[in-house]
Image (cartoon, rainbow, N blue to C red):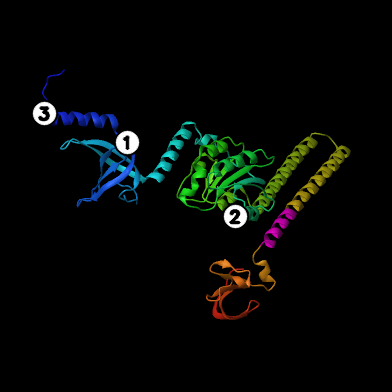
C-alpha cells in the first residue's frame, strides 16, 4: 500500500482527471428535478432515475434550440462529465437535450444513418439517372391522398401519354414502412416502368417514421430503376431522401422531374429532322462536286454523262420526297400537340360564354359551395370582376351584384 499522504485537493484533482478522461461526452436519460435559473442566465437541475441522480449545468451561451426544460419531465441529455473540485461533485455539463420520446427517435435515426453511410447507401456514385424520356412511372403512396392526385395532374399535363401504375400503401403507422418497401419491390418488377416515385403529402414530423426505416432504405437501394423521394416535408430530410436516386420536396415536383413536356419533345424531333435534312443536302453537294471532277477527266462523255445525270436526278428527287415526308410528319405531330394543349386549356369554356367562379382562392363548382357572406371573383374570357350575393331565394336562384372594379387579364 502506498503510504504517501495526500491532501484533499490532490485526491479530488486526481479523481477529476480520472472521471473526465474516461467518460467524455455521454447521453443520459432521466427526469428533471430541482430546476432553476440563476441571475447570470445559467440553468441548473438534477437528472434522476429510480435509484440515482446527477447534477447538471446548462450554461447561458450553450444553444439547445427553442426547447425549454420542464420540471418532472423525462429527457435525453447530451453532456460532458466533469467533477466540481470545491465539493467533489460529479456534474454533467449539458450541450443538448431532447424530450425522451423525440430524443429516442432522433437517436435511432442517427444510428441508422451512420450504419447505412458505412454500407455506402448514400454514395452518389450508386444513384441512377432518369431516362431522357419517361413514358411509364410507378407510384407508391396512399390511394386516396393528395400526392397521387398531384402526380397525375402534373404528369399528364406535361406529357399526356404518361402511363402511371399505383401501388397503394399506408404512409404512416406501424405497417406503413413494410407496405412502402413492398411497393418498391413490386413496381420494379413491372415491365416497362422506368422510374418510381415514393412519397406522401405534407404531415407532421412525427408522421415521417415510415420514411426513416432500414427496410424501406434497403428496398430503394436495391431497386433496378431510379427512385424519386417525394416526402412533402421540406424542413426534415429523411433517410429515404438520402438513399433515393433523386429527392424533391413535393409529389408535384417529382412528377415534373420525371416528365418532359410534349411540345418540347416535338420541337426537338423537328430540330433533329432539320439537321438530318441539312446533312443529306451537304452529302449530295459533295457527291455532285466529286462527280463533276470525274466527268472532266472523261473525253466527250455525252451519253454516259446523260445517264449519270438522270440517275443523280432520280436520287435527288427521292431524297427530296423523303425530306418533305419527314417535314410533314413533324408538322402534324406538332399540330396534334398544340391541339391537345389548347383542348386542356382552362380558358376554353370561357370562349363559349361560360364564366369561372372563385372564392377564397378555390374554384366554386356548385351553388351549395358558395359562401353568401363573402364576395367572390367572376372570371370571363377577357377579364375578371368581383361580385357578392344580394339574395339567395333557393338553391337554384341567386342574384349577384357586380362591383365596378374590373381587372383585365391576359387571355
* Residue in the picture at 26% in, 30% down: 21
Q: Residue furthest top?
A: 1
Label 1 secondary element: strand
Label 2 secondary element: helix
Q: Which residues make up the magenta segment?
A: 331-344
Judging by the rendered image, the residue that carries numbered circle 2 is: 150
**Residue 373: percent from left, percent from top:** 53, 76
Judging by the rendered image, the residue that carries numbered circle 1 is: 26
Asked whether residue 359 appears in the rendered view, the answer is: yes
Q: Residue furthest right?
A: 303
| Screen quadrant of the C terminus | bottom right
Judging by the rendered image, the residue that carries numbered circle 3 is: 7
In depth, the one of 296 and 240 nearer the eye is 240
Instruction: Work out whether mark 3 precedes mark 2 in sequence or the reverse, and give the earlier one.
Output: 3
Label 3 secondary element: loop
Q: Residue furthest front?
A: 50
Q: Residues within 10 Å of mark 3 (few under 14, many from 20)?
A: few
Q: Calculate the distance from the C-alpha at mark 3 to the C-alpha at mark 2.
A: 75 Å
In depth, the one of 292 and 201 nearer the eye is 201
Instruction: Work out whether mark 3 precedes mark 1 in sequence or the reverse, and give the earlier one.
Output: 3
Residue 227 located left or right of residue 4: right
Amino acid at each position: 500500500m502506498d503510504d504517501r499522504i495526500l491532501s484533499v485537493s490532490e485526491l479530488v484533482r486526481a479523481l477529476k482527471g480520472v472521471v473526465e478522461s474516461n467518460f467524455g461526452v455521454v447521453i443520459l436519460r432521466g427526469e428533471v428535478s430541482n430546476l432553476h435559473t440563476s441571475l447570470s442566465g445559467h440553468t441548473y437541475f438534477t437528472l434522476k432515475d429510480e435509484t440515482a441522480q446527477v447534477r447538471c449545468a446548462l450554461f447561458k451561451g450553450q444553444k439547445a434550440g427553442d426547447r425549454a426544460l420542464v420540471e418532472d419531465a423525462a429527457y435525453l441529455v447530451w453532456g460532458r462529465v466533469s467533477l466540481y473540485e470545491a465539493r467533489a461533485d460529479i456534474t454533467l455539463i449539458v450541450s443538448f437535450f431532447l424530450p425522451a420520446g423525440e430524443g429516442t427517435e432522433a437517436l435511432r435515426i442517427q444510428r441508422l444513418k451512420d450504419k447505412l453511410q458505412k454500407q455506402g447507401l448514400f454514395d452518389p456514385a450508386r444513384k441512377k439517372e432518369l431516362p431522357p424520356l419517361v413514358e411509364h412511372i410507378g407510384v407508391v403512396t396512399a390511394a386516396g391522398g393528395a400526392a397521387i392526385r398531384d402526380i397525375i395532374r402534373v404528369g399528364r399535363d406535361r406529357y399526356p401519354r404518361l402511363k402511371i401504375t399505383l401501388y397503394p400503401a399506408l404512409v404512416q403507422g406501424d405497417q406503413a414502412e413494410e407496405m412502402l418497401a413492398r411497393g418498391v419491390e413490386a413496381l420494379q418488377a413491372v415491365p416497362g416502368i422506368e422510374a418510381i416515385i415514393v412519397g406522401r403529402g405534407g404531415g407532421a414530423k412525427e408522421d415521417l417514421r415510415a420514411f426513416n426505416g432500414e427496410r424501406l432504405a434497403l428496398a430503394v437501394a436495391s431497386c433496378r430503376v431510379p427512385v424519386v423521394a417525394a416526402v412533402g416535408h421540406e424542413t426534415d430530410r429523411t433517410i429515404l431522401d438520402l438513399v433515393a436516386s433523386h429527392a424533391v420536396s413535393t409529389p408535384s415536383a417529382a412528377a415534373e422531374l420525371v416528365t418532359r413536356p410534349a411540345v418540347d419533345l416535338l420541337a426537338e424531333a423537328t430540330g433533329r429532322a432539320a439537321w438530318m435534312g441539312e446533312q443529306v443536302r451537304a452529302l449530295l453537294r459533295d457527291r455532285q462536286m466529286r462527280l463533276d471532277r470525274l466527268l472532266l477527266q472523261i473525253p466527250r462523255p455525252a451519253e454516259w454523262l446523260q445517264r449519270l445525270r438522270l440517275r443523280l436526278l432520280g436520287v435527288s428527287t427521292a431524297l427530296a420526297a423523303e425530306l418533305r415526308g419527314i417535314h410533314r410528319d413533324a408538322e402534324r405531330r406538332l399540330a396534334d400537340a398544340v391541339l391537345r394543349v389548347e383542348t386542356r386549356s382552362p380558358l376554353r369554356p370561357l370562349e363559349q360564354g361560360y364564366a369561372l367562379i372563385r372564392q377564397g382562392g378555390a374554384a366554386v363548382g356548385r351553388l351549395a359551395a358558395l359562401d353568401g357572406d363573402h364576395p367572390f371573383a367572376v372570371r370571363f374570357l377577357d377579364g375578371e370582376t368581383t361580385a357578392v350575393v344580394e339574395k339567395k331565394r333557393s338553391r337554384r336562384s341567386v342574384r349577384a351584384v357586380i362591383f365596378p372594379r374590373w381587372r383585365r387579364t391576359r387571355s
